[in-house]
Image (tube, rainbow, N blue to C red):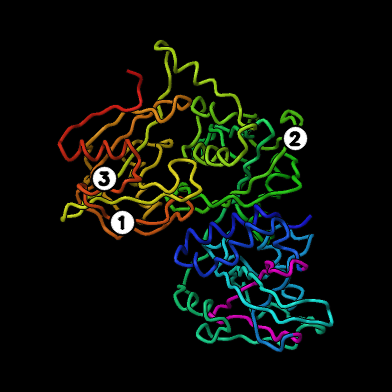
Amino acid sequence: MPLSHDHVRTTVETYLARHPHEREQLSDLLEALDRTGDGITSRSTFTGHVTCGAIVLDDLGRVLHVLHLASGKVLAPGGHAEPSDESLAGAALRELQEETGIPLQAVTPWPGYETLPFDIDIHDVDAHPGKGEPGHQHYDLRFLFRLRNANETPVVLQEEEVGGIEWRPADRAASPSLREKLLKLPLQIRAETANASALIYNDRGEYLLHLRDYFPGQIWEPGMWSLLGGGREPQDATLEHTARRELAEEAGLDLADLTPFGTEYASDGAGATVPIAIYAGRWNGDPRDLALTEGVMLAWFAPGDLHRLRIAGTTSDLVRRHSATLPTTQSGPEPEEERLASPRGTVPNIIGVHLYLERPDGTVLLGLRHPDSAFAPSTWHVLAGHCENENAITALLREAQEEAGLHIERQDVELVHVVHHIGKPKYPPRMGLFFRARTWSGEPELREPDKCIQWRFWDPAALPDDLVPYTRLAIEKIQSGELYSETGWPA
């Protein structure tokens, strides 16, 4: 089946979260996404359609180009998507192999671009009356790969389409937009560990979770509920292949369609940050029928029940964010509403950590959340996150590094405010801990562009109108020296 419109839309929006200044120049692509639906990948959609390119760098930082006989131009390998392609990155790899004979296993995605295009270019294509093709546009999504070993990689050209190959220095890349990005790319970068996980949901709006074995020190997140998935292996051409292989190996599960949903970041046992490509897929089976080979069990859970589980905050956020994209008719039961209506009984509270970062001039750091965020989309908020299996200050230091590249020492942190709040009646209550960093190193970076698209320091006396309400309250209380506040609770 053709690549889905949702797959293209998600990929483009994730790219724009990293390159928001390119939204205007990609307006034709965004309008086409609104206009053409799934036809956006069909070469017979002559208002314009998506193509996929493979940008391949060797150990010297040179870029692979091929001579396309049809156009007479020297370009990066690439071409039209086919119905058999499982992903946009997979289409780029297929074109690479067809045009040059370079096998999929000879290249690996560039660290940080496992699920994200390195560049998107729009260019006009001349009419070909002999083929019945009018002039149209190509929306070229270009994915970045590293060649493992140039000396051991055979090249077999597709003679009917390709007249030769050329390895060019980055400053001579054929495309100006590509050339600009390549010249900023750090070539001496180590290959990173990368994982892929599957966010599997059913028509009831429930999510399939995996209870991991309790082997502390031997496996990641022991005894916790998590998504199925694992680390990339040498035979995996893309991280989608990793996700599919892990589903087959862990549960004997084969899904017809997996759609990239985003990239999450987690810390491994050594404290290093590991990117996790998240792929979403629908399945309506019974977990008891699956042949589970790892862990304790698989089970369906509604998003409203996650607070009862031993589960990482990042996983809970991921499920809730995806759930918000589903039609309301698919949302699962929300038993918290009845529980919260009663003043009696024990209700678990979610703990969130928040960074109050104030410069010497008195301005405070805020981030503008991504338009697709399940919580407070297109709204300003302090740097924040949920506690995982860790204490609150450790969570704060981790979130500061993961989200903004800020390094803060434990002894430089002090608690300055606590806000006990409820966002909506269906949500469990939350305890927001606001910590001030007396000193830090680094400047705020967009390390998670699918969550935050801008960092900015604001005058506390002139905060933005679109600010998370409890954040506004907390900043006001911090300014006045008050330690505690409440919001959202019934009178």
Which segment is the magenta one?
Answer: 44-70
Q: Nearer the viewer, mark 3 or mark 1?
A: 1
Mark 1: amino acid? Arg
Q: What secondary structure is marked by label 2?
A: loop
Residue 329 is a magenta residue? no
Mark 2: few/some/many CA within 10 Å (<14, 14-19, 20+):
few
Residue shown at the point (69%, 62%) measured from the top left = 40
In the rendered view, does 442 fall on the left or right side of 350?
Answer: left
Q: Quadrant of residue 293?
A: top right
Point 42% across, 52% down: residue? 452
Mark 3 highlights which residue?
Answer: 356
Q: CA distance from mark 3 to mark 1?
A: 13 Å
Instruction: Name the mark on residue 456.
Output: 1
Residue 78: image x %, image y %? 69, 74
Q: Does 47 appear in magenta? A: yes
Which quarter of the image is occupied by the N terminus? bottom right
Local secondary structure at mark 1: strand
Q: Label 2: which residue?
A: 291
